[in-house]
Image (tube, grey):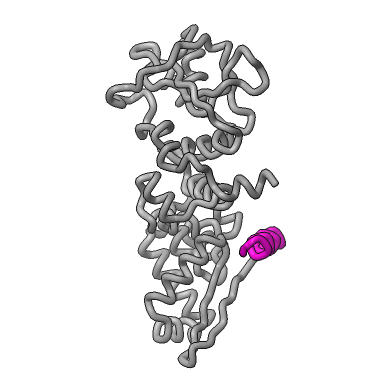
Amino acid sequence: MSEKREKRGLGRGLSALMADVNLSPREGADQGPARRPDLRVPVERLEPNPDQPRRDFDAEALNELAASIREKGVIQPLIVRQNPRKSDGYEIVAGERRWRAAQIAQLHEVPVLIRDFDDGEVLEIAIIENIQRADLNPVEEAMGYRQLMERFGHTQEKLAEGLSKSRSHIANLLRLLTLPVEVQDWLRGGKLTAGHARALVTAEDPVALARKVMSKGLSVRETEQLARVAAGKTDNMTRRRSATEKDADTRALEQDLSANLGLRVAIDHRSDGSGQLSIGYKTLDQLDQLCQVLSTTR
C-alpha cells in the first residue's frame, strides 16, 4: 500500500521541494545570499539519512569543501527533519557533504533549516539533490531521473520544468539506460562520453562498436558514422525502410516510449491505420521490469 501511495507523487509538489534543495553547481562557491537558518545545531546531534542514495564521498572534494568552510563558514544551511529514531536529534535531508566537511574543518555546529518531511519526501529530495550535483556521470544522472519517474510519478515535462533542464536532455539521458551494462560501465568510468553512448543506443551490437570506438579513439562524429555503417551492413533494408517510411512524429514517439520504459521500442505503422509496437529487452531483469510496468498501468 505504501508503495502505491508513493507512486502517486507528493502533494507538496516538485517545485516546492526544489525551493529547499536548489544548489549552486559547486558547494563552497559564491552562492549569493543564503537563507536564514532556523537555528544552529551541534554536529553530533545530526545523523545522515540511512536511505541516502549516494554512498561514496570523494575525499579530495570533501577536503576542498572543508578548506572553503574554514574560510567562509557553511554558507547554505543544511535541510533537516526531526530524527524519527532519536527525539533529541535531527536527520539530514540535504547537505550531508557540508556536514562531513564541517567536521573535517572542526566546526562544532552548523546552520540548519528544519522541515516536516515524511519518508517519501526525504527520499525524493535526496535524489533531486544528487541530480543537481555537478560531478554525477551521465548514467547516475539518468538513474536519478528514472527513480523520480518510477517512484513518484513525475513526467519528463515536470522534471524538465522543476530541475531547469530541457526535456530533450532528460530524454537523451534516459535512453542511455537502454545500453548494455558493459557499455554503461565504460560511460561511468569516463572511457566513453554521453555523445558516444547516444550514438550507440540503436546499434545492433553496441558493445562491439564501443570497443572499437575506445581502441581507435574515435570522436563522436566518427562514432555516429560507424554506427550508421554498421546498421547498413547488418540490416540495410530495415534502415532504408525506417528512413523512408517513418515520419518525424513516429520516430519521436519511439524515442519517448524508449526513454520512459528504459527499453528499445520500435513502431511499425501501416497505411491502413494498423501497426505493431515492439519492445525489446536484453535481460530477464528488463523483462521483469516491463511486466511490472504493464501490470500496474491502468
Residue drawn where x is 47% and y is 15% of the image: 102
Please indicate, yes or no, whether residue 282 appears anywhere in the rendered image.
no
Residue drawn where x is 47% and y is 52% of the image: 192
Instruction: State the quadrant of the C terminus.
Output: bottom right
Front-most of residues 83 and 240: 83
The location of residue 233, given as percent across then percent down, is 50, 80
Residue drawn where x is 41% and y is 55% of the image: 157
Tell me if residue 58 comes above or below residue 111 in the rendering.
Answer: below
The location of residue 255, given as percent across then percent down, is 46, 67
Tell me if residue 290 comes above or below residue 117 in the rendering.
Answer: below
Per the image, is 294 magenta?
A: yes
Front-most of residues 215 and 249: 249
Per the image, is 291 magenta?
A: yes
The location of residue 297, given as percent across then percent down, is 62, 63
The extreme bottom residue here reads 272
Residues rendered magenta in the picture: 283-298
Tell me if residue 160 comes above or below residue 34 in the rendering.
Answer: below
The location of residue 226, given as percent across then percent down, is 44, 69
Residue drawn where x is 47% and y is 48% of the image: 138
Disc tally is 0
Q: Assign the magenta stretch its main secondary structure.
A: helix
Q: Is residue 150 left or right of residue 223?
A: right
Please indicate, yes or no, whether residue 202 appears anywhere in the rendered image.
yes
Front-most of residues 274 and 191: 274
